[in-house]
Amino acid sequence: MPGGSEKEAIIKVRGLVNGFGDQLLHDHIDLDVYRGEVLGVVGGSGTGKSVLLRSIIGLNEFRAGTVEVFGTDTANLNEAHMREIEMRWGVLFQEGALFSSQTIAENIQVPLREYTKMSQELMNEIASMKLSLVGLDETAASKHPSELSGGMKKRAGLARALALDPDIVFLDEPTAGLDPISANMFDELVKDLQQSLNLTVFMVTHDLDTLRATTDRIAVLVDKKIIVGPIDELRKNPHPWIQEYFSGPRGRAAA
Amino acid sequence: MSTAHDATPSDARARFRMERKPRLLRLVAEGQWTTKDAAKLDVALRGIDVGDAVDAEIDGTGLEKLDSAGAWLLVRTKREWEGKGKRVAPIALAEMYGSLIHSVEHEHTAPPVVIHNRHTLEAFVTRIGKATIHGAKQGLGILGYLGRVTVEVTEAIYHPRGNLRVAALVHQVEETGINALPIVGLLSFLIGIVLAYQGADQLKRFGAEVFTINLLGVGLLRELGGLVTAIIVAGRSGSAFTAQIGSMRVNQEIDAMQTIGINTVDALVLPRIIGLVIALPFLTFYADIMGLIGGAVMCYFDLGITIPVFMRQLQEAVSVNTFMVGLIKAPVFAFIISLVGCYEGLQVESNAASVGRLTTRSVVESIFLVIVLDAGFSIMFSIIGI
């Protein structure tokens, strides 16, 4: 939203530079994510969508620039401060990244056990509630991740990401590898949860249907820069990659 | 007639108070009901005495913040009271929490999850039982595989269809044999030194130092040379076989081979087995020699036995039979190591974690089998009197 300065920027990226060797990936990009919005991040293969996500959540050291989350620069935080911030976000990795030696219920309880002093009884109740929120039934709770399908793993991963009721969730290609029906259901789930839990969602995705169904704004990574706007505004952008992306056969089908 | 009291300290971020009228029980929630304070709220809420009021109300309109954990606590309290026969009015909340409380109250009816304690006696016995059955299955599996490989090897030898991959075979000989020379050489050299040193130390007491050479010759040639080499190769090449074939499995390369019509035993297993069966006897021979050199060096420095004396004594101590007994075991060890390595590689499931697990298992199993076989050989040789 241009000129939307009255909105609170929950994530503020300024002058971010990333690269591998001689190859520059991000050339001084700026990005604001506002509280309560769903931001989709798209871009061709190798444009650094996941690197951007990893830079924000502190898994990737960037060359220059600053990343502010909840108004705090994450670069030079001590461990205690970083933990406080980490408690307020949840991340769903591409393959779910569930801990394979633990059951789904135990996976969901890992953040609860780490950050709160809840009784086991309450944790069991909360794990069950989170599973209901992401649309998994109680039979999934005692299973190990290897016994679940791809879509169920993503739901379970989302339940773990939501365990502490975070303010922000980061989703890395949440619908990749899902069949269209599961993908649609996942889109609806994200939208529902975003509304009922008042989440801010930062989502890397390739799925045009997802973009259309869930996002408020879209950030496009092109030419090492980032272009942000609502989907209808981006459709009018003359940049050839953006035109090809939104107006190609798939883009038109999703419209 | 209303009794109001704080159930939680008033300075807490999350607090509630109870109001009791003769027929009405009221819970007024205030502050921030979030995950952070859920533990404290949980304890306080469970301690509420519901009394004998007929009606109950939960008032959350004064809440500053509510998340799903807080919402669950409200819903749980409501359900508990209903279970005790109270008529509970719908939870009163600010409008912005409407969809949250709806999701928690109406879409969540499942019971709490059950976490199984893995440290009970029952679980322990179950694990033992499972491990036993698994071990038996594993043994059967390897036995079955042994059969299949034997058939394929025999076929490859008696009816060569040109399906023996010579390039792959030579590569395996290089990889498992020639590339293992430094480590095998160094270790057997050191074992020769240790054996000579310890032997000399003990035999010196009887003035029989010269028999150190007998100990060295028989010990190394008959047992240790072959055993140590086999164990090193099991750790080095057996694990590599499992990891290589296993990662091909994870990568679906084995599936691709099968769809193209390539026999995986021909392409992957036979070159490895035959390659190692060729390489290990040579490695064993080399280890024998390196061990004897190590022993000779030690004898020279520790006991002052010169090389010509060493050679003469060695010639008297060991016969060709001793040497052959050590060497004849090598192809059998090689066969077992490569068989187990390839078998476990093919057992890998489609996840990366199982590659690591099965690689470990492959090494443990092949070392175990090598030592068991060695014991078997000892018994056999003593019966036939070699």
Image (cartoon, helix red, strand yellow):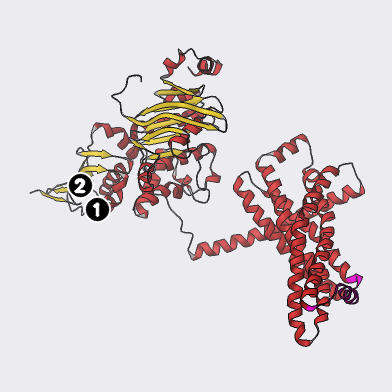
Q: Position of residue B201 (x, y in %)?
A: 73, 80
Name, please, the residue furthest toward the bottom.
B206
> Would you say A154 lies left or right of B180 here?
left
> Would you say B190 lies left or right of B386 here?
left
Look at 34% across and 35% down and name the residue there. A197
Q: Where is residue B94 in the image (x, y as percent from the top left)?
A: 23, 34
> Would you say A229 lies left or right of A49 here?
left
Secondary structure of the residue carrying numbered label 2: strand
Residue indicated by mark 2: B16
> Would you say A253 lies left or right of B67 here?
right
Q: Nearer the viewer, residue A95 or B234?
A: B234
Residue indicated by mark 1: B44
Secondary structure of the residue carrying numbered label 1: helix
User: Which quarter of the picture shows residue B55?
Assistant: top left
Name, please, the residue furthest toward the left.
B1
Q: Which of A151 and B249 is in front in this view?
A: B249
Look at 40% across and 47% down and name the residue there. A111
Dot 1 alpha-carbon crowd within 10 angstroms: few under 14, some 14 to 19, many 20 or more: some
In the rendered view, would you say B321 is above or below A48? below
Q: What residue type is labelled 2?
A: Phe
In the image, is residue B304 part of the stretch drawn in magenta? yes
Label 1–label 2 contact, CB within 8 A? yes
Query: For the N terminus of chain A, which image quadrant?
Result: top left
In the image, is residue B236 part of the stretch drawn in magenta? no
In the rendered view, would you say A138 is above or below B117? above
The answer to whether any part of residue A127 appears in the image is: yes
In the rendered view, would you say B226 is above or below B382? above
Question: Which residues are the magenta region?
Answer: B303-321
